[in-house]
Amino acid sequence: ATRGDGAFGQYLLDAAVWPTGELNFADLGVSAMTAPTSAASGELVHLTWTVGNYGTGSTDVSSWYDRVVLSLDDTYGNADDIYLTSVQHSGTLAIGGTYTAQTDVRLPTGIAGDYNVFVKTDETNAVFEYLFKNNNIRESDAPISVTLTDYADLEASNVTAPSIGVAGQPATI
């Protein structure tokens, strides 16, 4: 058969399976996040976010982790992401329930530029959410403008040394 749409002429079928109202499952989503708009590399910054359960059932586990990353672009999960921390949530979340998490994280030293902050709730997919995981990630409303912190500039002073030294012998400086 060479008249189908597949790579080898086979026929393809696209089907979507959606749950009925009889299935009960959680649907976690990050609904709000606050982050500073500017900071220096190596500085401690405070982040908060709110996670809600928008599903038809309570969470089936009582513990999961929320992951926080920095990214130079607006895409979570690619190669430029810088992992900052994971924050554990303990306790089940009822239908319509929310929790607010917060953490203080130190920005990496040596970075500069505009970085987006991303939070992904349930980073290891511990909570059964059927197909509804596309709202588990939230990007900060505005990037953090990170300035490079100056490196230490150490200078020695009052150094004295002998005017003549002998190879292989110790010298007092």
Image (cartoon, rainbow, N blue to C red):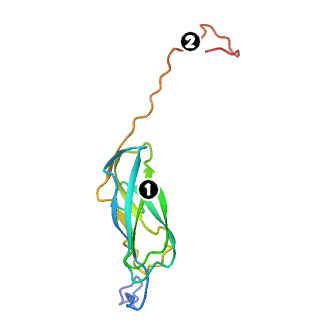
- Front residue of this view, candidates 161 and 104: 104
> Can you name the residue that lies furthest to the top here?
163
Q: What SS does tag 1 mark? A: strand
Look at the picture and state if 147 lies above or below 79. above
Badge 2 marks a residue whose secondary structure is: loop
Instruction: Specify the quadrant that holds the N terminus.
Output: bottom left
Pointer 1 local density, CA inside 10 Å: few below 14, some 14–19, many at least 20: some
The residue indicated by pointer 2 is 160
Question: For the residue marked with disc 1, what is the amino acid?
Answer: Thr
- The numbered disc on residue 134 is none
The residue singled out by tag 1 in the image is: 103
Task: Please name the residue shown 54% across and 15% down the image.
Answer: 159
Where is residue 113 drawn, in percent x and y?
34, 47
Nearer mark to the viewer, of 2 and 1: 1
Write down the quadrant of residue 102 in the picture.
Answer: bottom left
Q: What is the x, y in percent for residue 121?
A: 43, 67
